[in-house]
Amino acid sequence: MYRRRLHQLIIALYAASIVAMLGMMVGAFLNDRSIESNPGRALATVTDVGITRTYVDFQDSEGIYHSPQSGLLYPTGLGEGQQVWVLYSQSDPDLVKVEGREWTLSILPALSSMVVASLIAAAAWWTVGLSTRAAERRRQANESVNQNFPQASPES
């Protein structure tokens, strides 16, 4: 019983991770499509390179300065102070990416994450199978011992 429920949990978590990784690729595709539907081009200055985000400042075609809170899309290899050409959505200037970089850059991280998720799910599946089989054997051994030694009745 426990083994089946644990296996179902592993499958559910694995499926959720696969959906998340597909979402990584679909999200990048949709962002690129939004930028390409109403593009603007600007020279941006990299202001901060963090672990999770890279921030830039740029001036749009109307002369308004922007510093997107969500950071820059596809920032690999950029350094603080560097100037880089960016494409942004004129309808949403907070949606900005490095010029020449596409959503296809999200495929490799998503696939490598899928491989890691598959390895973790396989290890969890094997561990659950191994531990529940051992527990099942111990339970059966205890039951056979209890059958060989009948319990004293309370009437005696």
Image (tube, grey):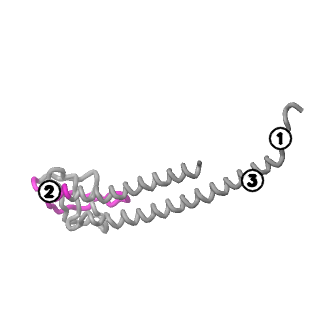
Outermost residue to the top: 155
Q: Is residue 135 toward the left or the right of residue 28 in the image?
A: right
Residue 141 circle label: 3
Name the N-terminal-most of marks 3 and 1: 3
Magenta range is 33-62
What's the CA distance linking mark 3 and mark 1? 17 Å
Q: Is residue 79 visible?
A: no
Image location (x, y in percent) of residue 84:
21, 66
With respect to residue 90, does 84 lie above or below? below
Q: Which residue is mark 1?
A: 151
Question: Which amino acid, by three-letter code, is at mark 3?
Answer: Ala
Residue 85 circle label: none
Q: How many marks?
A: 3
What's the CA distance linking mark 3 and mark 2? 68 Å
Q: Is residue 40 magenta?
A: yes
| Quadrant for the C terminus in the image | top right
Which is more foreground, mark 2 or mark 1? Answer: 1
Q: Quadrant of residue 150?
A: top right
Question: Which amino acid, by three-letter code, is at mark 2?
Answer: Ser
Residue drawn 64% across the image and 57% down it: 133
Q: Quadrant of residue 20?
A: bottom left
Q: Is residue 33 visible?
A: yes
Q: Which residue is mark 2?
A: 37
Is residue 35 or residue 65 the one in the foreground?
Answer: 35
- Asked whether the beta carbons under mark 3 and mark 2 sit within 8 Å of each other, the answer is no
What's the CA distance linking mark 2 and mark 1? 79 Å
